[in-house]
Amino acid sequence: MDPRADEGNEAAGRLTFWPAVISAAYAPLGWRRARFVLSLIRPHLPAGPVLDLGAGTGHTAALLSKEGWAVTMADVPPHAGALGQRLVARPIAAWLSRDFGVPHVLYGGAVLPFADRSFESVLLAFVLHHCPDPQATLREAARVCGGPVLVLEDGDDILPGRLERLTDALVNLEFGHPHAERSRAGWLDLFAACGLGVRHEHGFTSRFGGLRRRHRLYVLQSLVMWPG
């Protein structure tokens, strides 16, 4: 037997071992979070293709696919301090992409590799406050979307404080990551600057390690397509 074949099989086993282990370990939390996100956005999702921009572990995209939506995941490559993305999110997303047949696209973070209005909706679930340029990211999301842009973000009327930012970094294992958190008024200003109006919004609460955190869902639509 060719020893090089054995070495190749061992290498392939190492490449699949960690994604399999971390996917199984994270599954209860990942699917529970995905079901919660879907319960929030389902009333606002039209039929048709969905872009999950900043898809993270991919559980929400996989659940949407299972529920009948045509979903594409898009992410940027992890930076040096993005340990959670490198060690947890990307391996799981690759695993779920294969299992559920959901395309997973990596791009440079500037221009999305899709034509205008390629999707009927775009989801950004707790993504914008981690973007170096949230306005540019949101403009790109709006460009490729022919319907609602659904944004879930931390905070509410009060700007998230240092403790919330620290908790966010620890939960996501993200160090040296942008933290562009805003109050509700700050997000509304950003949406308006991108030519997006708010069709619906509501707040909700989560708990982590005994800490209660406030979040908000914004359902946005281009003011050009929705002048009223």
Image (spheres, rainbow, N blue to C red):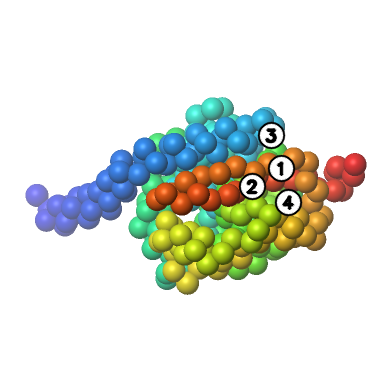
Q: First in sequence: mark 4 or mark 2?
A: 4
Say the numbered circle drawn on residue 44. Answer: 3
Is residue 178 depicted above or below 90 in this figure? Answer: below
Say the numbered circle drawn on residue 216. Answer: 2
Q: CA distance from mark 1 to mark 2?
A: 7 Å
- The residue where tag 1 is placed is 201
Q: As shown in the figure, which amino acid type bears the numbered disc 3?
A: His
Mark 3 lies on a secondary structure that is helix
Task: Give percent across and percent down for residue 143.
Answer: 74, 52
Mark 1 lies on a secondary structure that is strand
Q: First in sequence: mark 1 or mark 2?
A: 1
Mark 4 lies on a secondary structure that is helix
Tell me which residue sits at (90%, 44%) in the image.
227
Q: As shown in the figure, which amino acid type bears the numbered disc 1?
A: Glu
Q: CA distance from mark 4 to mark 1?
A: 17 Å
Tell me which residue sits at (59%, 53%) in the image.
154
Q: First in sequence: mark 3 or mark 1?
A: 3
